[in-house]
Amino acid sequence: MFELEGSFGKRVVGIIGGRVKIRNINELLRKLAEIDRENRTTSQIFDASRVAGKIHLLHAAHLALAARATGKGFAQSLDIELICWVAGLRQIERALKRVGIRRGEQSVALLTIGDAHQQVQCAQREIVKRLEIRRDDKVLEITSDKSGDLIRSFSIREQELKTASVSELILERVALLSLQH
């Protein structure tokens, strides 16, 4: 669990990784929303192959919360705002293509935001159980295979890699989104 603080006050963020077989994306998202309503949390699930570690999700969550708190958000809900910030893109459809989940067996990153540790833990426990996610936080790590996918997905040029790591370049792209208002 992580604690974030800013113009939005204090929030607790839980980040876990895992593997899941997705048969119906709409059904999965419906269950996710239902669990969030029950726990008064906001959760979003991402394709873990497009996530540059926990720091990527934390950075995006902080910026999304700050944007909404200052009236500079561009999505109607925090869960959609998170998709855009993690992708580093304002357009929801493009953001979903970059970091969204797909049908079939895949590795996923789950991010949950709430007001208290116990609230977030409870929500994530229920999400893992009801969505049948096999917990595996290693899917969040950047491997050489994943690095190549991140470079392609985030359109990172070879020249850029001479000055910073893949993770740093993705964090920069996410931060630059705040300048596009």
Image (cartoon, rainbow, N blue to C red):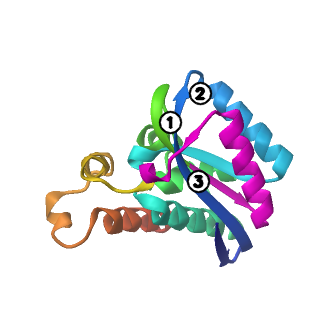
User: Is residue 180 in view?
Assistant: no
Marks 2 and 1, the one that precedes in the sequence = 2
**SS for callout 2:** helix
The span from disc 3 to disc 2 (Cα, nearest Å) is: 17 Å
- What element does badge 3 sit on? helix
Relative to 114, 137 lies left or right: left
Q: Which mark is residue 76?
A: none
Q: Amino acid at mark 1?
A: Ile
Label at residue 82? 3
Picture coordinates of residue 126, whole percent (x, y): 74, 43
Residue 18: x and y in percent read: 52, 44
The answer to whether residue 18 of the structure is visible from this angle is yes
Image mark for residue 25: 2
- Amino acid on which the number 3 mark rests in the picture: Leu
Q: CA distance from mark 3 to mark 1?
A: 14 Å
The answer to whether residue 165 is magenta is no
Q: Amino acid at mark 2?
A: Ile
**Residue reaching furthest top?**
23
Q: Residue furthest right?
A: 38
Distance from the alpha carbon under mark 2 to that under mark 1: 8 Å
Q: Are marks 2 and 1 in contact (CB under 8 Å)?
A: yes
- Looking at the image, do the residues carrying marks 3 and 2 touch, with CB atoms under 8 Å apart? no
Q: Which residue is mark 1?
A: 101
Q: Which residues are magenta?
A: 110-139
Viewer-closest of 30 and 131: 131
Say whether residue 180 is left or right of residue 43. left
